[in-house]
Amino acid sequence: MTGLRVLAVDDEQPALEDLSYLLRADPRIGDVLTARDGAAALKLLDRAIADGRPVDAVFLDIRMRGLDGVVLGRLLTQFTSPPKVVFVTAYEDHAVDAFELKAEDYLLKPVRPERLTEAIRRVCGNRDVSEAGPRADTIPVELGGVTRFVASTEVRYVEAQGDYARLHTATGSHLVRIPLAALEERWASAGFLRVHRSHLVAVKHIEELHIDSGKCVVRVGGAEIPVSRRHTRELRDLLVRRARKVKREDAE
């Protein structure tokens, strides 16, 4: 894999210089372009595409004069082959915007080298597997004052808590400001199924299904999740189809 061609965008020169320095220090990075505002960034991106050397990733500040980072991020999603986006900001209150735009990562200033290393790994990893199938979706969570992204593949089930959702993984749980309905729609293709008005389950993590006196529950990671009556047949049929498929594959 050749080095990544990236664009760093920040309207503060010292911050832009620091970010560019850290990017160039990483051996996975090839060219580093820079821009002081969103309009200049768009011109550079258009020129790079015209030259046949498109940018692989944009490391993007959010609060900038003129065209801010969130608006620019939305414009990038309209590209035929959009670059990966990593937000780099001093503010924590745009993590939901990052999730909606499917950003690769969300870094807080001052940028720590190890966090930038992780963000570059995400960009490189997703680029490497792009032809092998859909990549895991990610969602920003707060851990000890640090924003990191949890992959959908790590989540066993999701529990609604008002306008928030709690993601349950093998190592703990994370409360995020995203409605369960939004995750249901977005993660349907990733194997998640709504089994109750307050629960979304990763089907591959279902260990057992019990039906007793008309009540259905599934066991996921040691937790028992209720299944509403209207979802019971759909879930049972899905699990039967999965079991048959596994049996056929084992026989082959």
Image: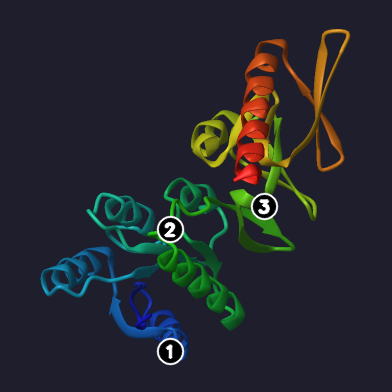
Q: Which residue lies under the disc numbered 3?
A: 154
In the displayed structure, would residue 239 be above or below residue 228?
Answer: below
Q: Quadrant of residue 246?
A: top right
Please state the horizontal and vertical placement of residue 133, each as a whole percent of the image.
Answer: 43, 53
Tell me the CA gap for discs 3 and 2: 19 Å
Labels 3 and 2: the sequence-earlier one: 2
Instruction: Determine the secondary structure under disc 2.
Output: loop
Q: Residue at x 41, y 66 (%)?
A: 127
Label 2 vs label 1, nearer the camera: 2
Label 1 vs label 3, nearer the camera: 3
Please state the horizontal and vertical placement of residue 218, each as a whole percent of the image.
Answer: 79, 28
Q: Which residue lies under the disc numbered 2?
A: 132
Mark 3, residues whose alpha carbon is within 10 Å: few (<14), some, or many (≥20)? some
Q: Amino acid at mark 2?
A: Ala
Mark 1, residues whose alpha carbon is within 10 Å: few (<14), some, or many (≥20)? few
In the displayed structure, would residue 26 be above or below residue 89?
Answer: below
- Work out whether residue 102 can be spotted: yes
Name the quarter where the N terminus is drawn.
bottom left
Q: Residue at x 54, y 38 (%)?
A: 187
Instruction: Determine the secondary structure under disc 1.
Output: helix
Left or right placement of residue 33 versus residue 210 in this view: left
Outermost residue toward the left in this view? 50
Labels 1 and 3: the sequence-earlier one: 1
Q: Amino acid at mark 1?
A: Tyr
Q: Which disc, if any, is residue 219? A: none
Q: Which residue lies under the disc numbered 1?
A: 21
Left or right placement of residue 214 versus residue 18 in this view: right
Q: Residue at x 61, y 38 (%)?
A: 248
